[in-house]
Image (tube, helix red, strand yellow):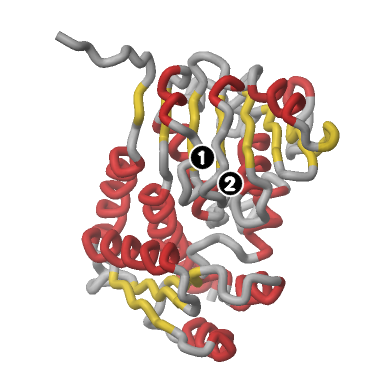
Amino acid sequence: MSQNKHQPGRTILASTISKTYDQEIKEKLNTLKKVKPNGPLLVGFLANNDPAARMYAQWTQKTSESLGIRYQLREMEDPDFLEESIIDANEDDEIDGIMIYFPVFGNAQDQYLQQVVKKEKDVEGLNHVYYQNLYHNVRFLDPPDNQLKSILPCTPLAIVKILEFLKIYNPLLPEGNRLFGKKCVVINRSEIVGRPLAALLANDGAIVYSVDINNIQKFTRGESLKFTKHHVEDLGDYSEDLLKKCCQDSDIIITGVPSENYKFPTEYLKDGSTCINFSSFKNFDDSVKEKASLYIPMTGKVTIAMLLRNMLRLVENSLKLKEKRTQTN
């Protein structure tokens, strides 16, 4: 009788992890019934022919509606009219959250469009105020009152929540230090995911090696976490030797290479490491299961949960601001 090859680790699907947050979203929606009896409204703008973007839109709609959130997909035949449509949505009191399926133009114009979305409706957390807070390790919008939580970009936040679910964050340590002693590699330094993710993990106490095709950088809050926010050090030009050295010493490997041909070298892994892939392509081959203790092949469903969680946080922030104004008048 043949036996399956023994694999010491576990593969955990994003759908399993997202259930925890889906339940949290349902409970939060119940508390908002008085002010949002029909559920909040999320509007997604699609102005490209990217099948991955359309699939993401379909997943978002399905998840939203299953939880009790209204969702509208607005398709733009001509992306030149997208800015005006976003401005109209900003001013529509019926709409609680706005998102754009990128890429639209695939250049700096996309970064401009991110800033057109009103920060009070920016469920993706891409507004410059949110980014500034993220990089400076500021967790609230209204210090010193600290009643309005800042919004974090969805995919980096999803990866943080995955690491919390996997018990890699140490809940016995103070909040903000719970990755102290952990070493991570993030293979992607995009402005949307890779760089903010490296900053988030470093701000929570980890040493993070941020990798792109040009060089490798080290994000850290310094020895014994002496800084309040992360600092960045260049380690040198990208090379396989330098990557291997960083990986063999790391507890967590996170990949987001947008290429069907890229495969992370399994031999670089430390035994028992945690591997997470947020690319829409499979960045690890099946041999990862022989070395990793925990492997998460995709993050999409957790990202959508974070998107919806962000929207409910925006609704709560808006209600708190209204209440504050009422008390001061």
Q: Quadrant of residue 68?
A: bottom left
> Farthest top residue?
1
Dot 2 alpha-carbon crowd within 10 angstroms: few under 14, some 14 to 19, many 20 or more: many
- 300 relative to 152 in the view: left or right: left
Dot 1 alpha-carbon crowd within 10 angstroms: few under 14, some 14 to 19, many 20 or more: many
Q: Looking at the image, which residue is at 74% across and 38% down?
A: 230
Q: Is residue 151 above or below residue 39?
A: above
Instruction: Return the x and y of residue 13 as percentages of the image width and height.
Output: 33, 38
Instruction: Return the x and y of residue 173 as percentages of the image width and height.
Output: 55, 22
Q: Looking at the image, which residue is at 46% across and 85% down?
A: 76
User: Earlier along the polypeptide chain: callout 2 or callout 1?
Assistant: 2
Give the amino acid at mark 1: Asn
Give the amino acid at mark 2: Val
Q: Quadrant of residue 113?
A: bottom right
- Labels 2 and 1 touching (C-beta < 8 A): yes
Q: Is residue 160 visible?
A: no
- 204 relative to 61 in the view: left or right: right
Distance between mark 2 and mark 1 Cα atoms: 7 Å
- Residue under pointer 1: 283
Instruction: Return the x and y of residue 238 as percentages of the image width and height.
Output: 78, 36
Q: Is residue 199 above or below residue 207?
A: below
Q: Is residue 53 above or below residue 193?
A: below
Residue 257 has which mark?
Answer: 2
Q: Is residue 190 visible?
A: yes
Q: Secondary structure at mark 1?
A: loop
